[in-house]
Amino acid sequence: MFTAGIDRWWPHDKGIGQGPIAHSVIEPFVGGRWYTRHADGSEVTVGHVRVWEPGVRLVVGWEISAQWKPAAHIELASEVEVRFIAEGPARTRVELEHRDFERMGKIDGESMRGHVDGGWPGMLECFAREAARNGSAP
């Protein structure tokens, strides 16, 4: 649901490309891209899958600069880890950690941390609503 269904829960107005998002994709393998395709046909890479453990853990690079532009310098990318912890037969806790901001430099790293710290809770709420709608509440 989190990866294969990202297009159903990630808001189409929360992208870094030109114009609204038409489709969001996380390719299901190490090295796969997390990207958005936009209404104008362009694609923007958000990051690449670093760890792929379906139903357990996902780690992706966040290849976006502090100026909210694509940044292909993987060595400067921060990292997003999502963990899925079973809490019963029909309940899963989702934990998300966005880290390694220091790779971006002090000023840019602090700026990005401030932006995403305020943004991820809303994104996880979008995911939780979609999961509840589909009978797979986290």
Image (cartoon, helix red, strand yellow):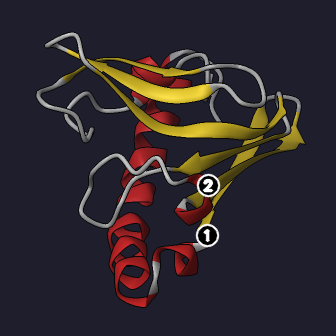
Which quarter shows the N terminus? top right
Q: Residue at x 68, y 36 (%)?
A: 49
Which quarter shows the C terminus? top right
Q: In which image quadrant can residue 26 be found?
A: top right
Residue 80, disc: 2
Q: Mark 1: which secondary structure?
A: strand
User: Is 71 placed above or below 66 here?
Assistant: above
Q: In which image quadrant can residue 97 be found?
A: bottom right
Image location of residue 76, percent across then percent down: 54, 64
Please give the residue where the numbered disc 1 appears in the rendered image.
Answer: 99
Q: What's the amino acid at mark 1? A: Arg
Q: In which image quadrant can residue 55 be found?
A: top right
Q: Residue at x 42, y 18 (%)?
A: 8
* Mark 2 residue crowding within 10 angstroms, few (<14) / some (14–19) / many (20+): some
Q: State if disc 2 and disc 1 touch (CB < 8 Å).
A: yes
Q: Nearer the viewer, residue 100 or 75?
A: 75
Q: Left or right? Give the position of 72 relative to 93.
A: left
Q: Residue at x 86, y 41 (%)?
A: 86
Q: What's the amino acid at mark 2? A: Val
Q: Mark 2: which secondary structure?
A: strand
Residue 27, disc: none
Tally of numbered tags: 2
Q: Left or right? Give the position of 24 relative to 78.
A: left
User: Is 48 placed above or below 98 here?
Assistant: above
Q: CA distance from mark 1 to mark 2?
A: 6 Å
Image location of residue 120, percent across then percent down: 44, 57
* Mark 1 residue crowding within 10 angstroms, few (<14) / some (14–19) / many (20+): some
Q: Residue at x 47, y 74 (%)?
A: 104
User: Is 90 placed above or below 68 here?
Assistant: above
Image location of residue 80, percent across then percent down: 61, 54
Q: Left or right? Give the position of 83 relative to 17.
A: right
